[in-house]
Amino acid sequence: MARPKVYVTRILPSEKAMNMLREYCDVDLNEKPEPPSREELIEHVKGKDGLLCLLTDKIDKEVMDVAPNLKVISTYSVGFDHIDIEEATKRGIYVTHTPGVLTEAVADLTWGLILAVARRVVESDKLIRQGSWKGAWSPTFMLGREVYGKTLGIIGMGRIGTAVARRAKGFNMRIIYFDKARRENVEKELGAEYKPMEEVLKEADIISLHVPLTKETHHLIGERELKMMKKTAILINTARGAVVDTDALVRALKEGWIAGAGLDVFEQEPLPEGHPLTKLDNVVLTPHIGSAAVETRARMAEMAVENLIAVLKGEEPKALANPDVKNVRPLSEVKMI
């Protein structure tokens, strides 16, 4: 049986993962630090049995058309909105992803953003570096807001939302949430209260978003929703950029509909130089680093490789994004190892 041919769109931060992949497959690796161009992606995926990609790689019908032998697309990410899942399923291509392994790292960063915005940490740091700290201690200087004892509103109480809520208990916060399904286990464990989304927006001092990007969640937070929030509220987004209407958020921050925001994700990445968000002091911006912990990124690499190899062995992968694909092409038919 011929060894599977696999294209990997970026160097993985785990020697263990790369060695595992090379043990079973012939690997075509993009060794540049930046993502492959569209033309490079299309050229290198030709004749491949597997593709290991990132969320920066758009995998659509055009890509699949040039790779008729493709059996598995393994994405090094939790989200898979960059892949045409419907098209892949129709063609019998298994799509896998890496949920779970980055939960705690993203929850940590979410809390970093909450505290940075509430206590104006980034503004204060910039002020000192610019040599603008001139006066002595003052009762009204750089006033932020307390986090302890406030109300945290979570929209999307999945793995990451729950991890964020768990950390909130240490701040003695009231936790309210909205999700398309009640999470009674979380309610029992953390005392979280389920509420309609409008009530969460109106009552919370901090809103944290943890939903996947779908047709239903695109611009879930727009002008209407931002105007429902308290003027003293903070919005945190470590989910996907397009969950928030950026233009509406810029107006909200400029005009004081809300007090501030912390963003790790954006509708356009990288954020263009001179973007209106970069001109505002009441927003903290990080460049999509939610999972950027050494341990987390290594575990993601290993899971992405394990998923890909499992499918090529005809075995159930740890995380299959399109389970309906098994009705189109059973695992026994994709087995190559």
Image (spheres, rainbow, N blue to C red):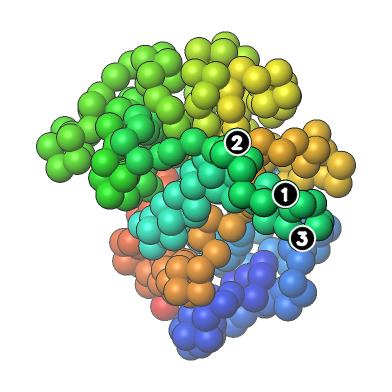
Looking at the image, residue 259 lies above or below residue 54 = above
Q: Which residue is mark 2?
A: 140
Q: CA distance from mark 1 to mark 2?
A: 12 Å
Mark 1 surroundings within 10 Å by alpha-carbon count, few (fewer than 14), some (14 through 19), many (20 or more): few
Q: Which mark is residue 228?
A: none
Element carrying mark 2? loop
Q: Nearer the viewer, residue 90 or 142?
A: 142
Mark toward the viewer: 2 or 3 = 2
Q: Earlier in the sequence, mark 1 or mark 2?
A: 1
Mark 3 surroundings within 10 Å by alpha-carbon count, few (fewer than 14), some (14 through 19), many (20 or more): few
Q: Earlier in the sequence, mark 3 or mark 1?
A: 3
Q: Position of residue 2 (x, y in %)?
A: 52, 81
Asked if the residue at tag 2 contacts the one at tag 1, i.e. Cβ–Cβ closer than 8 Å, the answer is: no
Looking at the image, residue 313 lies above or below residue 170 = below
Residue at position x 45%, y 31% in the image: 207
Residue at position x 37%, y 15% in the image: 199
Amino acid type shown at disc 2: Thr
Q: Which residue is mark 3?
A: 129
Amino acid type shown at disc 1: Gly
Q: Nearer the viewer, residue 64 or 150?
A: 150
Q: Earlier in the sequence, mark 2 or mark 3?
A: 3
Q: CA distance from mark 2 to mark 3?
A: 20 Å
Identify the image quadrant of the C terminus: bottom left
Mark 2 surroundings within 10 Å by alpha-carbon count, few (fewer than 14), some (14 through 19), many (20 or more): few
Asked where in the image residue 185 lies, by quadrant, the reply is top left
| Relative to 153, 8 lies left or right | right
Q: Which residue is mark 1?
A: 135
Does any portion of residue 86 appear in the rendered image?
Answer: no
Q: Position of residue 296 (x, y in %)?
A: 45, 68
Asked where in the image residue 52 lies, by quadrant, the reply is bottom right
Q: Position of residue 179 (x, y in %)?
A: 34, 28
